[in-house]
Amino acid sequence: MIHLKDIPTVNVPLYDELAIKKVLARVIKLPSVSVFLPKAVVEKNAPINRDFLFSVLATKEPELLNDLIYNAHKQRNVREGEEAEMENIEITQNMMNML
């Protein structure tokens, strides 16, 4: 049995990469996690409370949760960097002289 004081609080960003369905698909087969999930979630893929799922991960698989968050940040930053590059316009020296 786990006491409430033993469950770390986590602030998981609301990223698409950390959507419940995506995270649950990765962790549902882990015995250390699945034992704490409701049977309906494990057997019938029923919805689960986001805070509950991430609290279970923070308690039983903290390294995995940190990796998931880190990778989500990394993917998001790569995309934002690519989008920023697409917004830039390169001009030649001749064009600059015309201005």
Image (tube, rainbow, N blue to C red):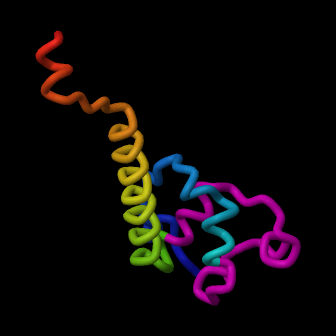
User: Which of the 4 image quarters holds residue 41?
Assistant: bottom right
User: Which of the 4 image quarters holds residue 40?
Assistant: bottom right
Indicate the position of residue 48 as horizontal and vertical percent values. 73, 60
Image quadrant where one finds the C terminus: top left
Give the residue at x 61% y 67%. Answer: 23
Answer left or right for 6 relative to 55: left
* Pick the front one: 49 or 66: 66
Image quadrant where one finds the N terminus: bottom right
Indicate the position of residue 44 as horizontal and vertical percent values. 88, 72
Indicate the position of residue 32 as horizontal and vertical percent values. 58, 86
Give the residue at x 52% y 49%. Answer: 15
Indicate the position of residue 64 as horizontal and vertical percent values. 45, 76
Answer left or right for 49 relative to 89: right
**As displayed, is residue 5 above or below residue 32?**
above
For the view shown, which residue lies furthest in the bottom direction? 31
Report the label total: 0
Q: Main secondary structure of the magenta part?
A: helix
For the view shown, which residue lies furthest in the front direction? 94
* Pick the front one: 86 or 34: 86
Answer left or right for 28 relative to 47: left
For the view shown, which residue lies furthest in the top direction? 99
Give the residue at x 68% y 73%. Answer: 25
**As displayed, is residue 39 above or below residue 98?**
below
Q: Does the magenta segment cover residue 53?
A: yes
Answer left or right for 5 relative to 38: left
Q: Does the magenta segment cover residue 17?
A: no
Magenta stretch bounds: 28-57
* Pick the front one: 33 or 66: 66
**As displayed, is residue 11 above or below residue 86?**
below
